[in-house]
C-alpha cells in the first residue's frame, strides 16, 4: 500500500510540476516595430555620405546638382539619442569650418519624414526610399523640389 501511495504522490507531483511550468510561461506577444522605429534603425545602422543631390520643380524632372570636391568627403552619423552629427571631411570648403557639427533630428510618428534642427532652423524632408543601403530625402519649398541620396560611407 505504501508503494502505491508513493507512486501516486510522485505522479501527482509530476503533474503539478508540469502545470506550474506551463503556467509560469509569460504570454509573449510579439512586439511589432513601428515604421518610425524601423526608419530610426536604418538611420543609426551606419555612417552616411551624400552620393548625389538633385533639384527640380515640384512636379517636374530633376537635374543633378554638382558637388564641390570639398563636399564629397563629408559624412553624417545619426545616433539613437536623436543627434545628427555632420563631419566635414579632410578637404574643407572653408578653412574656418569646424570638423563636426551636432544637430538634433526627429522622425515623424508615421516614419515618413525627417526633421533636422540646424542652427535653430528646422529642415524637413520626406523619406522616399530606404532600400539597398541607401536613403533618399526629399523636400519641397516654394515650388522647388530638392532630393538628397545618401549611401554607406
Image (cartoon, grey):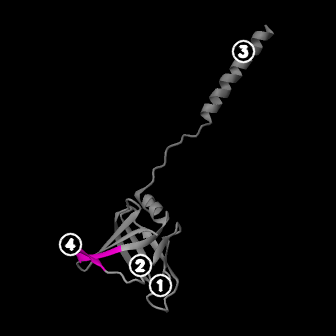
- The answer to which of marks 4 and 3 sits earlier in the sequence is 3
Residue 76 lies, with reference to residue 4, above or below; the image says below
C-alpha gap between disc 4 and disc 2 = 24 Å
**Inter-mark Cα distance, 4 to 3:** 82 Å
Residue corresponding to mark 2: 72
Which label's residue is closer to the chain start, 1 or 4? 4
Q: Is residue 21 left or right of residue 90?
A: right
Tag 3's secondary structure?
helix
**What's the magenta bit mostly, secondary-structure-wise?**
strand
Mark 1 falls on what kind of element? loop
Look at the numbered disc 4 and give the secondary structure of its residue: loop
Of 125 and 132, the residue lying toward us: 132
Which element carries disc 2, helix, strand or loop? loop
Residues at marks 1 and 4 touching, judged by CB atoms closer than 8 Å: no
Q: Quadrant of residue 117?
A: bottom left
Q: 50 or 56, which lies in front?
A: 50
The location of residue 131, given as percent across then percent down, is: 37, 59
Quadrant where the N terminus lies?
top right
Q: Which mark is residue 35?
A: none
Task: Check if mark 1's residue and mark 3's residue have beta carbons within 8 Å.
Answer: no
Does residue 122 lie above or below 129 as drawn? below
The single residue placed furthest to the left in the displayed view is 60
Q: Write down the quadrant of residue 110 in the picture.
A: bottom left
Q: To which residue does mark 3 refer?
A: 8
Residue 64 lies within the magenta run? yes
Pointer 1 residue: 91
The location of residue 123, given as percent across then percent down, is 38, 77
The mark that comes first in sequence, 2 or 3, is: 3
Residue positioned most to the top: 1
Amino acid at each position: 500500500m505504501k508503494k502505491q501511495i508513493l507512486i501516486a504522490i510522485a505522479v501527482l507531483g509530476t503533474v503539478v510540476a508540469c502545470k506550474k511550468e506551463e503556467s509560469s510561461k509569460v504570454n509573449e506577444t510579439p512586439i511589432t516595430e513601428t515604421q518610425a522605429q524601423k526608419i530610426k534603425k536604418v538611420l543609426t545602422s551606419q555612417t552616411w555620405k551624400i552620393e548625389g543631390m538633385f533639384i527640380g520643380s515640384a512636379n517636374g524632372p530633376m537635374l543633378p546638382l554638382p558637388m564641390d570636391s570639398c563636399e564629397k568627403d563629408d559624412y553624417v552619423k545619426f545616433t539613437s539619442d536623436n543627434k545628427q552629427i555632420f563631419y566635414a571631411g579632410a578637404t574643407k570648403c572653408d578653412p574656418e569650418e569646424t570638423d563636426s557639427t551636432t544637430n538634433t533630428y526627429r522622425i515623424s510618428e508615421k516614419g515618413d519624414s525627417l526633421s533636422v534642427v540646424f542652427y535653430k532652423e528646422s529642415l524637413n524632408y520626406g523619406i522616399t526610399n530606404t532600400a539597398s543601403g541607401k536613403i533618399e530625402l526629399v523636400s519641397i519649398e516654394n515650388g522647388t523640389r530638392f532630393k538628397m541620396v545618401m549611401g554607406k560611407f
